[in-house]
Image (tube, rainbow, N blue to C red):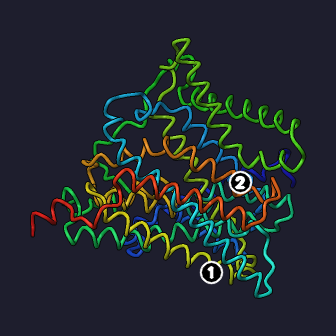
Amino acid sequence: MSPPYPFDTMLVFVFLSAMLVCGVVLRARVRLVQTFLFPSCLVGGVLGLVLVHTGLFAIDRSTVEAVAYHFFNISFISVGLTPNEATNGSSRGWQKLRGAGWMALMQGLTFPLQAILSGLIVLLLGMAGMDLFPTFGFLVPLGFNEGPGQALSIGKVWESLGFGHAATIGLTFAAAGYFCSFFIGVPLVNRGIRRGHAAHGPRRLPPDFITGILPREATNASAGRLTLHSGNVDTLAFQMALVGIVYGLTYGLVRLLGTLMPADAAAILWGFFFFFGLVVAFILRKGMQLVRVAHLVDDGIQRRITGWSVDYLIVATVAAIQLKIVWQYGVPIGLMAVANGIMTTLLVVWLGRRLAEFPLERTAAIYGTVTGTVSCGLLLLRISDPDFRTPVAFEMALMNVLVLPIVGGCTVLVNAPLWWGWPIGLTMMVFAAISGAALGAMVLLGYLGRRRMSLSTAEKA
């Protein structure tokens, strides 16, 4: 019997939900998963990938990719709607500007260098007779430095411009970045702790952090607050309605801008839907402040919406990877993933050791960010600073504001060969100029001093 309504999208949601719950169970029970602190969404995504490729579950990958794309856009919209203490002009934010500036410049350095290294590999493989799409290597910084959402979003647009399987390749690089973040990042942070580089000498990680499940008797923090009377409308419904309104306005804006541009440039605009959504959400929140109704937006619930959408995004993006495509491009994918993993690790560790304050905490935070996402950075930071006693968590919030022009400009630049017809060599030269500017700014701001010891190490000496 055929159902009276289409169920494809909801069945994909059911599958992703089941994988996420399985990830929670595996995180709570499997020692290897706990050792490297793999988040449940990543574990669930890998499990989904295995189940799909063994034929135990049959799902439409195009629907999974579409769902992931929309979750990605929702995550940025909810960020734009969330009041951020790092942008409210407080003196505390300005006092933490130096640490946030270093992390922003690190992204301004690693993104271009990842693009240059991968571009060089594309050129070398081309000389060896392997013809790759010009922007093949630029999927690496999108996956490593920005995460699966951007890699999927822009990769899907590139597919419409002739780059076959770009979305799957981008998701593969994002997954490779996640494994660098945890397989390399967790041991590096633990090694720094053992050597006494943590500012506050963290205690043993609590069991709930390792298993990912809070104990029954724990006093849990509130997930949000009610801003509307439940007899009128549920607050969660209202918060989601704001997200929906912004989504609709953004859709109209992107379609309008597309009518004013050539067809190929208009297609690329859909890859930047997340950025337009962020801007529209910010404008809506400011408008609500002007008419004195901004108190109706609850930051706690909006953060839960962000986290919810990111968790489902990661499950979907990993499960949607097509292994036969990865196998087909195994040589370039393997070379670029390994080369960028090594280069990024060495660069972040070398520069992090030269920080005068909180070198381990800041290095952990930025390493997770430039190989995975900001969430990965926060997880690595919590290993070295379990109670967030250092200002680094706040600095990460401020960094997201400072880095927006840098990352936004680099995200536009990866499209230069398709948008403006630039040769890959010219694009790499511009990336080199950006990385040089970031490095020069580090020198001028005094970030590149000689190798330093943390306070705890100096006291032991």
Mark 1 is surrounded, within 10 Å at the Cα level, by few (under 14), some (14 to 19) or many (20 or more) other residues, namely: some
Q: Position of residue 189 (x, y in %)?
A: 32, 67
Q: Residue at x 15, y 62 (%)?
A: 456
Quarter holding the N terminus is bottom right
Amino acid on which the number 1 mark rests in the picture: Gly
Q: For the image shown, how many numbered marks are present on the structure?
A: 2
Mark 2 is surrounded, within 10 Å at the Cα level, by few (under 14), some (14 to 19) or many (20 or more) other residues, namely: many
Mark 1 lies on a secondary structure that is helix
Q: Residue at x 42, y 37 (%)?
A: 223
Badge 2 is on which residue? Answer: 153
Mark 2 lies on a secondary structure that is helix
Q: Position of residue 111 (x, y in %)?
A: 56, 60
Quadrant of res 446: bottom left
- Is the residue 191 above or below the residue 376 in the image? below
Q: Left or right: where does residue 55 sit relative to residue 452?
A: right
Q: Position of residue 428 (x, y in %)?
A: 67, 65
Badge 1 is on which residue? Answer: 334
Amino acid on which the number 2 mark rests in the picture: Ser
Q: Left or right: where does residue 322 sit relative to residue 307?
A: right
